[in-house]
Image (cartoon, grey):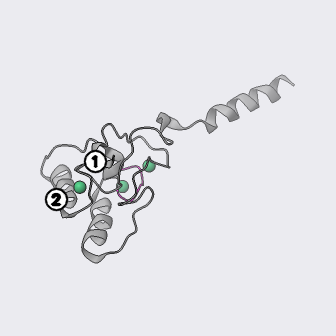
Amino acid sequence: MRSCTLALSVGLFLSLPLHGGWASGDEYFRGDAEDNGTVIAGDIDFLVSFLYLGGSAPECEDAADVNDDGDIDNADIVVLANYVYNAVNNIPAPGPTDCGTDPTSDPLDCQFGGGCN
Ligand SMILES: [Ca+2]
Ligand SMILES: [Ca+2]
Ligand SMILES: [Ca+2]
């Protein structure tokens, strides 16, 4: 009986979201890396600058994680460029035109999100 209770407790603990990533933090447009309220070519420039030229970090990391894989890297630039230049929208929720919070748990945070209200 005791071990059953322990297993249940461990199970509940493991089901809790890490870093409080579920629906926490500010609302944002995914892809709006520079946080100005629209997803445009300037966001690609911002990501290139941040990743390769020592530019400033995005205030809303979740917005810069364009493909929502929990990391900000070149793959995000590819997805963003496809949206901006080829009108291919492979951007996960909340998407580039809907204001919302991150539906998936990850170590990234969204501290500002000022361009989404
Ligand atoms: Ca923008
Ligand atoms: Ca990513
Ligand atoms: Ca996420």
Query: Bounds of the magenta span?
Result: 66-71
**In this view of the protein, which residue sits in the foreground, 74 or 100?**
100
> Residue 74 has which mark?
none
Q: Can you say whether 82 is above or below 29 in the image?
A: below
The amino acid type of the residue labelled 1 equals Gly
At numbered mark 2, what does the secondary structure look like: helix, strand or loop? helix
Crowding near pointer 2: few (<14 within 10 Å), some, many (20+)? Answer: some
Question: In the image, residue 54 lies at what x, y percent?
Answer: 13, 46
Furthest residue toward front = 117
Which amino acid type is marked by label 2? Asp
Q: Please state the horizontal and vertical placement of residue 103, each as a whole percent of the image.
A: 50, 49
Spatial separation of the CA atoms under disc 2 and disc 1:
17 Å
The quadrant in which residue 31 appears is bottom left
Vertical order, 1 against 32 (above or below): above
Residue at x 38% of width, y 70% of height = 89
The response on whether ligand 1 sits within 8 Å of label 1 is: yes
Taking the spot 36% from the left edge, 48% from the top edge, the residue there is: 28
Q: Secondary structure at mark 1?
A: helix
Q: Nearer the viewer, residue 8 or 114?
A: 114
Q: Which residue is mark 2?
A: 45
Q: State yes or no: residue 91 in magenta.
A: no
Task: List x then y, in percent, for residue 85.
Answer: 24, 74
Report the quarter where the N terminus lies.
top right
Q: Give the class, few, some or many, for how many residues have Cα within 10 Å of label 1's Cα (few <14, many ≥20).
A: some
Of residue 1 and residue 100, the one placed in the foreground of this image is: 100
Query: Does 105 sit left or right of 114 as displayed?
Result: right
Name the side, left or right, on which 39 lies relative to 45: right
User: Splitting the image into 4 quarters, where does residue 76 fall?
Assistant: bottom left
| Coordinates of residue 53 in the picture (x, y in percent) | 12, 51
Q: Earlier in the sequence, mark 2 or mark 1?
A: 2
User: Which residue is at 31% across, 70% downward?
Assistant: 83
Q: Name the residue carrying label 1.
A: 115
